[in-house]
Image: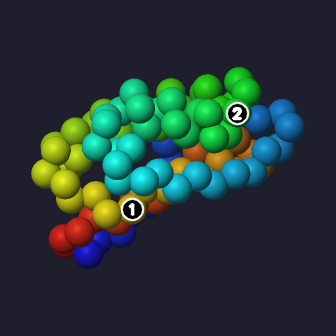
Amino acid sequence: MSRDSKMLGQVKNESKLQKAVSVATTVLVLGCSAVGAYVGLQIGGSVGAAVGALVGAFVGSLAGVLAAGLLKTFRVKLHKDGWVEVQYETRFA
């Protein structure tokens, strides 16, 4: 197993919302737009829409990993300062 964490970017987070969303592998299989929409809905509002767009673009770059079924876990964290972090674990090193 291999674990990785990346900071995707920063969104405007005036309300200092802090949230973590775990994405099920069944949603990951649906692809980048489904993951972006799911994360955006879970966070909510304009902040959720911005985070969903960032996450959707990132998941799109992982298309080969998703197609091979290598992702085991995927989690998105929105920090109070607006930074968006993804943490994921693959099935093999």
Q: Position of residue 20 (x, y in %)?
A: 63, 55
Q: Which residue is mark 1?
A: 73
**Left or right: 86 with respect to 21?**
left
Determine the residue located farthest toward the right in the rendered image: 15
Q: Secondary structure at mark 1?
A: strand
The N terminus lies in quadrant: bottom left
Amino acid type, callout 2: Gly
Q: Position of residue 14 (x, y in %)?
A: 84, 33
* Residue 9 visible in this rendered orientation of the protein: no
Determine the residue located farthest toward the bottom in the rendered image: 1
Q: Residue at x 59, y 33 (%)?
A: 40
* Residue 19 vertical placement versus 48 (above, below): below
Going from the N terminus, do you reach mark 1 or mark 2 first?
A: 2
Q: Residue at x 60, y 27 (%)?
A: 50
The answer to whether marks 1 and 2 mark residues whose Cβ atoms lie closer than 8 Å is no
Q: Which residue is mark 2?
A: 44
